[in-house]
Amino acid sequence: MSLAFKDKNLEREFTDTYDKDVHIPLRYGIIISILSWFSAIGLIPLIIPESNNWLPLLTFVYIGSYFGFIVFATYKASFKGYYHLLGAISNAWAGLYAIYFCHQFPNGEHLTLPVLIFIIFFGSYMVRLRWLAGCLAALTYVAGYQVYIIWFSDLTISQILLYGFVAWMTLIFAILAGRVAETNNRTSFIQRKTIKEQSDIIEREKEVLLKEVHHRVKNNLQIIISLIKLQQSKLTDVNVEREFREMKSRV
């Protein structure tokens, strides 16, 4: 089921790259989630007049404490390597709470499904390099949604079957899409790594060739100097010898 590389060093390098690339989007994604939930809290009494007074407070405490912890975790080095799990857990709980929250609305049974589908794909983005974590999150609230529509909703049997089918098909699609996305990411990682290694090899070869050229030029100049010396040793005219000495110095 896992797509991990057999080479542990390669898998560690890929994980480090993932941690570096994903913790900023994860942090911003959670912040966006917090702001979107907080912005809706003030509308709860207006949209759901018959709701309990503790629903806005519960939403505020839940979103603020849990998602706030996820944002805090992205700033701590000790959580490095666990961002995909944090994203999956936060997304799973967000989905379960969304099911409960939407149930408070009039006709909330019909509102829950599109919200669920949105959360599935938003969660897939947040944990995009770890499709198993994304699937676990999606499976959690799809199963929760299935329990909700069967036991706690007022939907008819046909609606239950239809909504349940759409939810599970969305999950299957997210699983397949997530696996393909992680496979592509791993392939792209290998390609980038190979290109970098080849570029390093080419650069080292250039340096070796340049040193060899310099060495050959130096040898050729040394041969010219030796020939001048050889010829100079046979001269008797002082003026001509001085010219040869000057020529050798220039070389």
Image: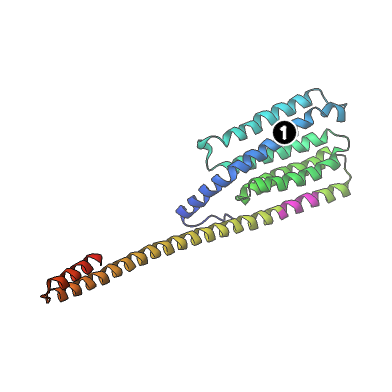
**Between residues 188 and 197, which one lies in front from this camera angle?**
197
For the question of whether residue 214 can be seen, the reply is yes
Residue 72 horizontal/vertical position (percent): 59, 32
Residue 247 counted in the magenta span: no
Name the residue located 72 percent from the left edge and 46 percent from the top edge.
120
Extreme top residue here?
A: 53
Q: Position of residue 188 (x, y in %)?
A: 57, 59
Most foreground residue, 225 or 215: 225
Q: Residue at x 77, y 38 (%)?
A: 99
- Is 225 left or right of 99, judged from the image as shown? left
Specify whether residue 169 is painted magenta.
yes
What range of the chain is rendered magenta? 164-173
Main secondary-structure element of the magenta-colored stretch:
helix
Q: For mark 1, what is the residue?
A: 35
Q: Is residue 138 left or right of residue 197?
A: right
Q: Dot 1: what SS?
A: helix
Q: x, y (%) of residue 5? A: 51, 56
For the N terminus, give its image quadrant.
bottom right
Near-viewer residue (158 or 56): 56
Q: Residue at x 33, y 68 (%)?
A: 213
Q: Is residue 110 left or right of residue 65?
A: right
Horizontal and vertical percent position of residue 145: 77, 42
Residue that lies at the very extreme toward the left in this rendered image: 236
Callout 1 environment at 10 Å: few (<14), some (14 to 19), or many (20+)? Answer: few
